[in-house]
Image (cartoon, rainbow, N blue to C red):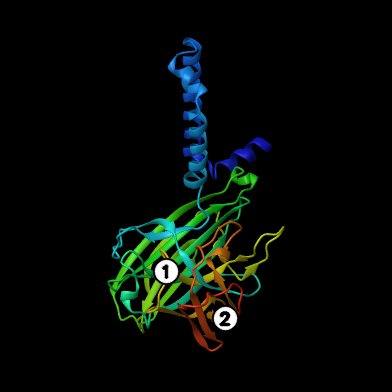
Amino acid sequence: MTIPVTLGIAAAYFALVADDILLMATAVVAGAIVGTLLMKHGANSWPSRLASSRWPLITAVTLALLMIVVIYPDAVVGIVPQEGSSGSTASFGMGVHAYAGGYMDSALGRTKGVSLTVSFAGTNLSSIQPDNYLAAGLGVHSPGCCVDGIDYGYRHDAYLFRNGNEVLVASAWEVCDYVSACGGHSWKVLMFLNSSEIGVTNLSSEIHLTVEWIGHTVYWAYGVGAGPLRNMTSFAAPPQENPDFDIGVASGSGGESGHYFFQFGIMSRFPIGKGGWSVTMGCPAYLAEPGWVCVEHASTIQGGESYWKLLWKWGEDYPHVEAVSSWDQPVVFAYSPSTTMKNFETLW
């Protein structure tokens, strides 16, 4: 019985480690060839001289570093425009953000939908560097049902570029922790990516973002200003995923950080580092009976602590950001020349 169960678990990630297996197989074949040459030639042959030099060790260390830095997944990798992008919907790839925001600071719960209203009001476009961007949106966790360690993360973000163009990006991730069910190592896969250009808008206009389960499909929708919600895109989720979002906070164990399942925040390729920009976020909300409910309690979080699962974060720290809020007003994120927003401070 053990072997069929093991094979079933392995099937969930085997395709994701195929490149690593191929690399190891190539190394084994190369080592066999070198060993054969050493046996066929004398001590003064080039294979013998190569084996006695430092180059094999240097090569091995370099390959190990490449596997750690490049091949194994980055816990904070996200969706970023490619270098030189001016907002084209076809120019998004994977990279690392600077990130700061807030999270629903309440007990763990589940919902069928989450939403957020964002605005770039008060932003001078010239404050955004030509190779940078200012983004705002939400991220939320979705649980797997059948394999220990596998979970899912969803994002809906609005990207603002220096030329005034605004682009919406929907993304979905599958991750697996470093547990035996995941092969003893972690991995992260971009399952779904879609972008939609909404063009140059009045920066004071509010953009309403939603992500919602209907059946076993996830739908992203948006509205601009007082306009109605429009369906942006949808994704048929994996059958082993529970059709819910986790919201609130789950405490870590064994010295681990907590898991902040429902977050909202700002992102840039790198910190803008000067004034002239601001992002307003209103009513991060979740679906409950009889409808949408604004989050009752929220606290601040920097990228370095933005764990939406055991290893996985939405970005790295964003220095020189302040968050101004009150219980009956939206939160405003903006540049601060002298301070940096701390983690786990109450927003409302």
Indicate the position of residue 36 as horizontal and vertical percent values.
49, 15
Which residue carries the number 1 mark? 157
> How far is disc 2 from disc 1 in space, using C-alphas?
21 Å
Q: Tell which of 92 and 288 is nearer to you.
A: 92
Residue 59 seen from this side? yes
What kind of residue is marked 1?
Asp
Indicate the position of residue 190 as horizontal and vertical percent values.
45, 54
Which residue carries the number 2 mark? 347
- Tell me which corner region of the image, top left, top right, bottom left or bottom right, holds residue 242: bottom right
* 296 relative position to 29: left or right: right
Q: Is residue 250 above or below residue 293?
A: above
* 268 relative position to 8: left or right: left
Q: Tell which of 18 and 120 is nearer to you.
A: 120
Indicate the position of residue 161 as horizontal and vertical percent values.
32, 70
Of the numbered discs 2 and 1, the one sitting upstream in the chain is 1
Q: Quadrant of the C terminus?
A: bottom right
Q: Secondary structure at mark 2?
A: loop
Q: Secondary structure at mark 1?
A: strand
Q: Which mark is residue 97?
A: none
Indicate the position of residue 339 as horizontal and vertical percent values.
52, 77
Q: Tell which of 338 and 111 is nearer to you.
A: 338
Q: Nearer the viewer, mark 2 or mark 1?
A: 2
For label 1, the crowd category at 10 Å Cα-Cα, with few meaning under 14, some 14 to 19 and many 20 or more, is many
